[in-house]
Image (cartoon, rainbow, N blue to C red):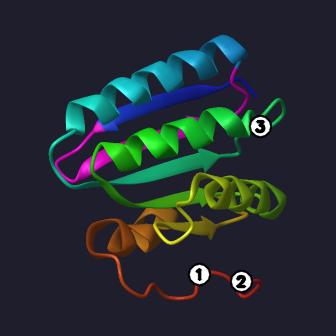
Amino acid sequence: MTGSYAVTPTKWGLHVRMQGELSMAQRDAAIAEIRDCFLSLRGRSWTSLIEFDHFQAENFRPERVVELVRLAQACGHLRSAIVLTDWQWASTMADTMIAAGADDQVRIFVLPDWADEGCEIAMPWVLHGGVVPLVSEAA
């Protein structure tokens, strides 16, 4: 599976979608684009929705994510929903959020069979925070 990504500013903040297998060059380009968006959002409170649709996590660089999360916090980020398809990848992402000091600002939603309803389930957290419903029996 080839990979693609999209970084889309929204009225509430930032929507990032990573799908399939991204090369290191694509990952670095995505990181640069995300960093630029963070800086453009500085000075106001904002939230984010991040989707990993069958994302191949091989060669994952948690230190780069920690840097991005800390920059986001410095730029007014309030909370994020991460929607992904793999429990092991969710565990890795949770450890990364803990390392970044953002574990209370992030909710991870795991949907093994990808569907657009993952975003629908996650959006209440993105927009309003608070308690979110249980998404999976395994959770």
Q: Is residue 115 visible?
A: no
| Residue at horizontal 42 percent and vertical 88 percent from the top | 131
* In-image side of 31 versus 1 (left or right): left
* In-image side of 125 versus 5 (left or right): left
Residues under labels 3 and 2: Cα distance? 22 Å
> Residue 34: x and y, percent?
42, 30
Q: Is residue 101 visible?
A: yes
> Residue 114: x and y, percent?
63, 58
| Residue 65 vertical position relative to residue 121 in the rendered view, above or below | above
Image quadrant holding the C terminus, namely bottom right
Task: Assess whether mark 1 and mark 2 are in contact (beta carbons under 8 angstroms).
Answer: yes
Dot 1 falls on a residue whose secondary structure is loop
Please identify the quarter of the rendering in which residue 45 is found.
Answer: bottom left
Tell me if mark 2 has few (under 14), some (14-19) or many (20+) residues whose alpha carbon lies within 10 angstroms of its own.
few
Q: Residue flagged by tag 2: what amino acid is it?
A: Ala
Q: Earlier in the sequence, mark 3 or mark 2?
A: 3
Q: Earlier in the sequence, mark 1 or mark 3?
A: 3
The residue identified by callout 3 is: 56
> Residue 83: x and y, percent?
56, 59
Q: Which residues are magenta?
A: 9-22
- The residue most toward the top is 25
The residue identified by callout 1 is: 135
Please identify the quarter of the rendering in which residue 80 is found.
Answer: bottom left
Q: Residue flagged by tag 3: what amino acid is it?
A: Gln
How many dots with numbers?
3
| Residue at horizontal 73 percent and vertical 59 percent from the top | 95
| Residue 32 vertical position relative to residue 21 in the rendered view, above or below | above
Residues under labels 2 and 1: Cα distance? 7 Å
Q: Residue flagged by tag 1: what amino acid is it?
A: Val
* In-image side of 68 versus 128 (left or right): right
